[in-house]
């Protein structure tokens, strides 16, 4: 008889956001008259920028003509998009990234889960706590997590790096030696980011212990403060120890059109084996490429009009973040994030658990957020709100919270 991947049986409950959706559906069914404001899932609400839509329409027209029709995309992605990425995201910041080190994909979530394919099951994984659930869950699926301890809420073989008020929500270097280190800055869920000097310490540490850093920079477009690196490759030596994940979802609203990329430098080696060549083989074998129409849309993000229009969208969401920060602070809440990221990380009042506050907020203000404990044990007694709603809904949500007391 066939066998299954038993690592899947070690996963704890349903995916966090599926669980939230289920609870909200049940509440709506019981209270159909109540208008719910959703500030939970980090999904954008503004339409795609005009420059992006124009490029998509043009690309669709090309697909209807024999001479300009496109079939399978090149393995790494079309050169026109990779060139735009290299020039604007790296070269403009003084970082030298080659075209064949950039791999176009259908999003950072896919790549963050799939990157484990090129690493051994024996690797020790270090993750921040709280953490974006995909990093942990995909390593559970890949057999690197060990057994789950219900008492601690942790897996035996995972190295947890607590991010708490005490350390400013920035992880300390682990005492145990990891092989793979997952970092996300600006951070999801805490909304905090990392100064360049602090990130350099992580690069130096990874080079010292022989670890690889999986660096998720999906929210770099939201960085407003100086001396906050937009790419890990601004740090010396990062091209010898780091893989960077990027997304078009949050900076350009591609959550529904799906586009991202991963950078794997050729200097990143395991002995005499190039990780770039391994990822290229995995990419070519298991992925047929993002659609031509979507890659042309991605190219348009880097046009003069596209850069201006998407920057305006980012500013719109960050205005929401400021509104939430100021509103919650004035209402007496302890609030973090929302300066360099579209996430607000608030401390639950009166010692409530994260899920107790979720229920309280849903029932008394009809607002949906995300319980911090869903991101890991160190997220308990915290709660995440996103700035991706409309100005009107964001303002209404803050007024509801104020009235709630």
Image (spheres, rainbow, N blue to C red):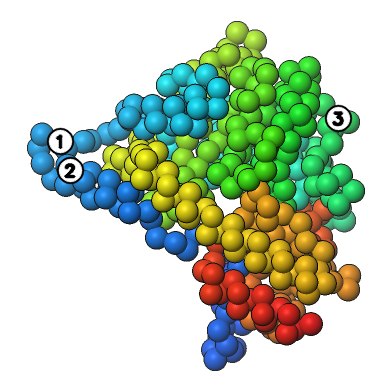
Considering depth in this image, is 109 or 93 the residue closer to the camera? 93
Residue at mark 2: 63
Given this view, does label 3 or label 2 mark the residue nearer the observer? 2
**Image marks 2 and 1: residues in contact by CB distance under 8 Å:** yes
Identify the mark at residue 49; answer none if there is no mark: none
Q: Check the image and report above or below for 44 versus 249.
A: below
Q: Residue, x 52% and y 53% (percent of image)?
A: 314
Compare marks 1 and 3 and give the one earlier in the sequence. 1
Q: Element at badge 1?
A: loop
How dense is the environment of label 1, judged by Cα within 10 Å: few (below 14), some, or many (20 and up)?
few
Compare marks 2 and 1 and give the one earlier in the sequence. 2
Q: Residue, x 60% and y 74% (percent of image)?
A: 395
Residue at mark 3: 176
**Image marks 3 and 2: residues in contact by CB distance under 8 Å:** no
Compare marks 3 and 2 and give the one earlier in the sequence. 2
- Say whether residue 107 is visible: no
Residue at mark 1: 68
User: Residue 40, how many percent across, how many down?
Assistant: 62, 65
Q: Element at badge 3?
A: loop
- Say whether residue 51 is visible: yes
Q: Looking at the figure, which quarter contains the C terminus?
A: bottom right
Q: Check the image and report above or below for 5 versus 189.
A: above
- Residue with the most extreme top position: 272
User: Residue 156, how many percent across, how many down?
Assistant: 82, 41
Q: Check the image and report above or below for 34 versus 188.
A: below
């Amino acid at each position: 008889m066939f066998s299954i991947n038993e690592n899947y049986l070690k996963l704890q409950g349903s995916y966090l956001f599926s669980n939230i959706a289920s609870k909200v559906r049940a509440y709506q069914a019981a209270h159909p008259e109540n208008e719910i404001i959703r500030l939970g899932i980090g999904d954008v609400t503004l339409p795609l920028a005009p420059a992006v839509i124009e490029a998509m329409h043009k690309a669709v027209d090309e697909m209807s003509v024999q001479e300009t029709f496109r079939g399978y995309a090149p393995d790494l992605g079309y050169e026109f998009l990779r060139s735009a990425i290299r020039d604007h995201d790296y070269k403009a910041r003084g970082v030298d990234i080659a075209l064949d080190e950039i791999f176009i994909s259908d999003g950072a979530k896919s790549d963050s889960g799939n990157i484990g394919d090129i690493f051994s099951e024996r690797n020790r994984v270090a993750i921040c706590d709280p953490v974006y659930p995909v990093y942990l869950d995909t390593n559970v699926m890949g057999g690197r997590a060990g057994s789950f301890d219900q008492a601690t809420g942790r897996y035996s073989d995972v190295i947890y790096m607590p991010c708490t008020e005490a350390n400013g929500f920035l992880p300390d270097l682990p005492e145990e030696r990891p092989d793979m280190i997952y970092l996300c800055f600006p951070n999801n869920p805490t909304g905090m980011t990392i100064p360049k000097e602090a990130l350099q310490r992580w690069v130096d540490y990874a080079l010292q212990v022989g670890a690889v850093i999986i660096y998720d920079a999906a929210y770099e477009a939201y960085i407003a403060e100086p001396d906050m690196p937009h790419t890990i490759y601004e740090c010396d030596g990062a091209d010898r120890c780091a893989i960077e994940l990027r997304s078009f979802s949050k900076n350009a609203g591609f959550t529904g059109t799906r586009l991202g990329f991963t950078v794997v430098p050729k200097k990143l080696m395991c002995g005499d084996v190039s990780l770039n060549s391994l990822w290229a083989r995995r990419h070519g074998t298991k992925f047929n490429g993002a659609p031509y129409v979507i890659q042309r849309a991605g190219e348009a993000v880097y046009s003069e009009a596209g850069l201006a229009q998407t920057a305006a969208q980012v500013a719109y969401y960050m205005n929401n973040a400021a509104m939430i920060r100021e509103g919650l602070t004035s209402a007496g809440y302890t609030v973090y994030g929302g300066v360099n990221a579209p996430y607000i990380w608030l401390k639950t009042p009166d010692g409530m658990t994260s899920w107790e506050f979720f229920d309280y907020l849903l029932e008394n203000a009809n607002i949906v957020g995300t319980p911090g404990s869903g991101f890991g044990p160190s997220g308990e007694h915290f709660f995440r709100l996103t700035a991706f709603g409309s100005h009107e809904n964001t303002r209404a949500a803050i007024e509801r919270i104020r009235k709630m007391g």
